[in-house]
Image (cartoon, rainbow, N blue to C red):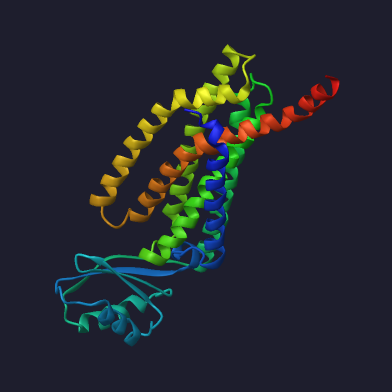
Amino acid sequence: MDIVGKRRIFLTISLVLVALSVVVLGTSGLSLGIDFTSGSTVTYQFTDEDTSAAEVTDALSDSGYPDSIVQALGDNQFFIRTDDLGVTGLDDVNTEILKLDRGARVLDTSTVGASVAEDTVQNAITAVVIAAIFVMIYIMYAFRSVPSSYKYALAAVVALIHDVVIVLGVFAILGLAISAEVNAIFIVGILTVIGYSVNDTIVIFDRIRENVTLAPGREFRSTVNISINESVTRSLGTSITTVTVILAMLLFGGVSLRDFLIVLLLGVLVGTYSSMFVAAQVLVLWERRSLLPWRKAAATNS
């Protein structure tokens, strides 16, 4: 299968997806959780199945928090995100909730202050940047035996950025559709996506390195195409197995890990695509461009 020959199609698809993701992020943005914005969250469960989100919203308004966001989770559970409740705020909310006489009980509550939220944002950005730098250093060292190993490092980072941007774009859409929130565990998910993307890319690159060593005179485009075809079964097998486990956890693992698992699922799908159809193709484009002056010189001499 001539995958490299269809690189323009694959790269065009990627460019469109990245562009759409940037537009979505620029217009709608991500739905940030309290880890990034500060505030409080409370999860209630009611014994009365007729309890509605409107009733919970009214109770929050009566307790002095009219701008609270109420989300039904199923199983008579409601997730509430509001301003920082402080010391007595939760007691005020509980008083109004109990007036509903629906058999309410608190399942979980958490509060994050403004300074902690600001530190979380800074640490998240730092973590992603440091991860990208170490990825480049590792790949340059691992592929030091091939010419221009920095090209492999930069191609892997291009694929990494491609994956993260698309995952963020899709997650921004899910924030509007199902109220998916970006929180601290989301950053763990993004770092996991980076690790998976780089691992899958290195599998392809390692096969390219082996084939370049075995047949140094062969056209690089053909070497890359052969390498992708030799690695595709392993990459798809790993991805399908991982996706199966993530889907099982999404279906039966409950709401608390939902957003984290969605990030992992998106990362596995996009990372598998980018390792074969983005990172490897960037290498080919770079190699062909670097050979262009030599071709012109050869044509002139002939």
Task: Give the vertical position of 90 relative to 28 (above or below).
Answer: below
Query: Camera-side residue: 239 or 224?
Result: 224
Left or right, residue 92 beside residue 284: left
Left or right, residue 52 beside residue 80: left
Query: Camera-side residue: 288 or 145?
Result: 288
- Dividing the picture into quadrants, the one containing residue 139 is top right
Image location of residue 242, percent across then percent down: 34, 38
In the rendered image, the residue lying farthest to the top is: 214
Image location of residue 152, percent across then percent down: 62, 31
Q: Which residue is drawn at 51% across and 46% down?
A: 163
- Dividing the picture into quadrants, the one containing residue 259 is bottom left
Image location of residue 33, percent across then percent down: 44, 64
User: Looking at the figure, which quarter contains the C terminus?
Assistant: top right
Task: Give the vertical position of 54 relative to 255 (above or below).
Answer: below
Does residue 181 appear in the picture of this structure? no
Does residue 122 appear in the picture of this structure? yes
